[in-house]
Image: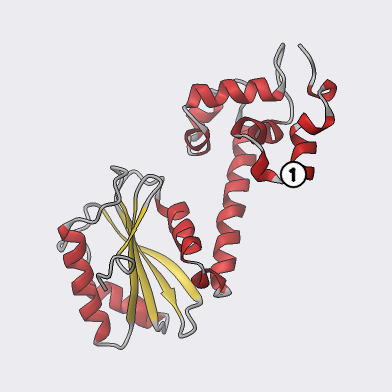
Amino acid sequence: MVSIRDWPAMERPREKLLHRGPSALSDAELLAIFLRTGCAGKSAVDLARELLASFGGLRQLLEADRKSFCRGMGLGDAKFTQLQAVLEMGRRHLSAVMEKGVGFHNPQMVKDYLTTELRHRQREVFGVLLLDNQHRMLGYKELFQGTIDGASVYPREVVKLALSHNCAAVILAHNHPSGIAEPSQADRRITERLQKALQLVDIRVLDHMVIGDGEVASFAERGWL
């Protein structure tokens, strides 16, 4: 086996990242940098390719639970804790950007933030982004779990939460574990109820985003608000 150290400099994952940026790397190359070393008879890139094939892709590996992750060759609790730390840093970075108000000049960033929070959840979760009058994020709160319909989402609880944070606007969000982001009629009905309830206390609903698997449906973009 040829060691990565023997590869041409610009083909080595670390050097490639430094010179061309992280977007130039394949999933296997990015994972190889995280792994740092391979195992008997395999370079870090070879091992990364096998792991990606075994888990079914990078996302599946990143979202694997501890037991499943640690079964992977060359992985274990140390790598699992490192990965969770990296993922949490990414989430906190997005949150910090949102708190500065930067994210609301870029709708995709809002979608990315909510996707990070909700896409991996196995049950439907309903959350609220709380915003000040300059549309900076005051906080994010998950209120309800289970099937999102008129019986499980209570407008009074959303209003109570919004008033407790003295917010001026909100963005509603929930996930579809099926992976299909298309809003249901129940989603549209509860959004209308929440919008009317919040209007009574002068709080705007800027959007309701439905998070699927790799896609986000925006009520605002569809002209439904």
The image quarter in which residue 173 lies? bottom left
Q: Position of residue 40 (x, y in %)?
A: 72, 12
> Is 219 positioned to the left or the right of 28 in the image?
left
> As rendered, which of 62 and 107 lies closer to the eye?
107
Measured along the vertical axis of the image, is residue 173 above or below residue 8?
below
> As rendered, which of 192 and 122 lies closer to the eye?
192
Q: Position of residue 202 (x, y in %)?
A: 31, 88
Q: Position of residue 179 (x, y in %)?
A: 32, 43
Residue on which the image places disc 1: 20
In which quadrant will I find the N terminus?
top right
Residue at x 28%, y 87% (from the top left corner): 201
- Residue 145: tell me if it is visible: yes
> Is 191 positioned to the left or the right of 48 in the image?
left
In which quadrant will I find the C terminus?
bottom left
Q: Secondary structure at mark 1?
A: helix
Residue at x 67%, y 32% (from the top left corner): 29
> Is 98 positioned to the left or the right of 199 in the image?
right
Label 1 amino acid? Arg
Measured along the vertical axis of the image, is residue 82 above or below residue 140?
above
- Residue 74: tell me if it is visible: no
> As rendered, which of 151 and 102 lies closer to the eye?
102
Q: Position of residue 175 (x, y in %)?
A: 33, 53
